[in-house]
Image (tube, rainbow, N blue to C red):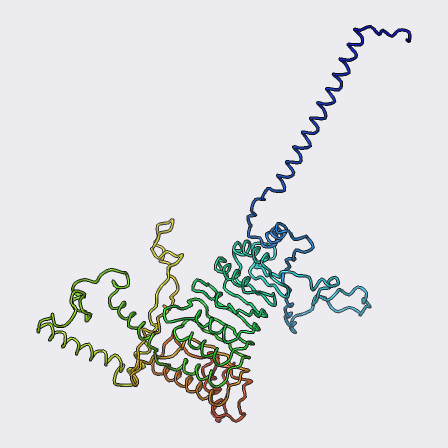
Amino acid sequence: MPEGVDDSPANARFASIAKKVKMGKRTEKALKEKAAASTSQEASEDDVNKVPEPYTCTGHFDPDFTELCRRAGLAPSEIPTVVIRAKRPGTPPPPDPKAKDPNPPEEAVDVAEEEPKPKTYVTKERFAYFKPCIQVEMENEDKPATVTEVYIRGWKIDDMMVGIFKTCFPTIEKLHTINFWNTGLTDKTLRDLAAIFPQCPNLKNIVIEGNPIPEEPWACIMGEDSLIINLSLRHNDITDRGASGISSALSTVTTCNKNLISLNLSHNKITDVGAEAIAKGLRMNRILLCLSLASNRITDKGAMKFGELLSRFPLTHEEVVERRKLLRDKGSPDRGSGKSPPPSRRAESKDRPGSVRSGSHLDKGDKKRDKSSKKKDNKKDKDDGKGGTKKADTWKKASLIAETVTKTTKGKKTTSSKDKKGGAMPESESPDMVEAINPLLESVESIEGQLWIPGNRSIISLNLSRNEIGEAGLKSILLAVQYQITLANLAPNPALKGLMRLSLGRNPIRADSEAYQKIQDLMLTRDPFYKAQAKSPDGDTQSLAG
């Protein structure tokens, strides 16, 4: 045993206790580390399973779109960039020859190396041109909240991207134009986009081109709640099936699109069947002003349907029934509101009372009164059907349509107010707006047992160029133009001008076609910018075009 070492029982017991205490501290430390590790693991699992808070868009399209793409799981390199749409540089004003140049030209110096780069194009990296991007136009490029137009061209818009647009488009206050070209839309994505459009407060112009969809659900863009004013659907391979849906969206006997004024269906596959359907959709529509069906497959049969639409046409059975309903509701406003009419009006009605089943229960006096009233009503109906004995009276009655002018006060106060000095301020009047009158309420003319009404004179521009229209179709359109001009001369109506622009070029028409030449001469005078030529004292014609 070494010297100085005490191996007494007390020392041995102390060493054993010290060893146990040291082992206890180690065990406690290990338990603490294990507990901390498990807690951190649970916290990390909670972070993974925790749903992030939804992003609130600020109305600034670029940062909102980028953040939504990042949250959707796109890598930074996969997020389409938002760039300002390139514009063609404006033409510089011509130099003023009278102005003196303050800096006289100096001697020519070779400065080819210092010549600035041209500003008509911008160089980019290799393949950067083909990378997906979103082009925007702004009112003020220094203010990101002033995005007015969005252009997407040449890359596919899938369901995830539509969901991103659904979140950020409605928050762009000044957005009024959306242009999708060759974006691979499907039936589902188009319907989802159509549901977004009404949520954009100022969206008026929609361009969807180069997106053929087999289901052709184009009518979903033109619903009754649609606020779109200008719609272009070129190069979408729209057939008669799609044209039929568009026709129903334009108008039916009971419904009508009240906002769309311009529709472009050129460069599609619409035949006479589709043209007839669109003409049917325009029978009760008096809102659309411009229609283009250029570069389709329309022949004389389809052109004749448009000639009938533009001149006059007979009402169908459904339209006659709806006309009677409208006249009934117009004569007794309480019927439309669900209220029962007053007793006096019910007594004068020709309808049989509900408690009387047959004429046997009526006394002779009632029968005589009924007969006399029926004779008067029949006479009145005949007079209304004929529309007058003179032809001029017919034109005068036709001119009464769409004369009602209403003043819309939406967002404006019409009550007079006083300024701080106590002076009376003039009442703020809203501009006059022509009320859209149902065509079924127009004056009718009875011809061979059918009720005829004037055709659609609200369309001012019709493009039927590059089709297959021949001489028979031209004659039908010529008669329609002559009808509209005659009607406008006999009963001018500022609300219904009729055709002012008609395009029929590139059709299989003979060069010496008399009908085509007459149409050209008539439409020249219909041009609002046309100025007749004045004759000089010598007999030569002089143009007044300026």
- State the quadrant of the N terminus: top right
- Residue 242 percent across, percent down from the top left: 50, 72
In the picture as drawn, the residue positioned furthest to the right comes out as: 2
* Image coords of residue 459 (percent x, y): 44, 76
Count of all numbered marks drawn on residues in the image: 0
x 59%, y 57%: residue: 161
Horizontal side of residue 176 vs 81, given as left or right: left
In the rendered image of this protein, does residue 311 appear above or below residue 138? Answer: below
- Which residue occupies the foreground of this view, 513 or 448? 448
Q: Does residue 120 sit above or below 539 in this rendering? A: above
52 vs 535, left or right, is right
Report the front residue among 210 and 83. 210
Q: Write down the quadrant of residue 436 in the picture.
A: bottom left
Q: Residue at x 42, y 67 (%)?
A: 258
Instruction: Tell me where residue 386 sits by quadrant.
Output: bottom left
Give coordinates of residue 172: x percent, y percent.
54, 55
Q: Does residue 196 sit above or below 486 in this rendering?
A: above
Q: Nearer the viewer, residue 168 or 427?
A: 168
- Residue 209, picture quadrant: bottom right
Which of the pair 391/51 is nearer the observer? 51
The picture places residue 431, in percent across and down from the top left corner, at 39, 64
Residue most extreme to the left: 364
Query: At x 60% / y 67%, what residue is drawn?
Result: 181
Residue 5 vertical placement versus 232 (above, below): above
Instruction: Classify residue 27 as left or right of residue 519.
Output: right
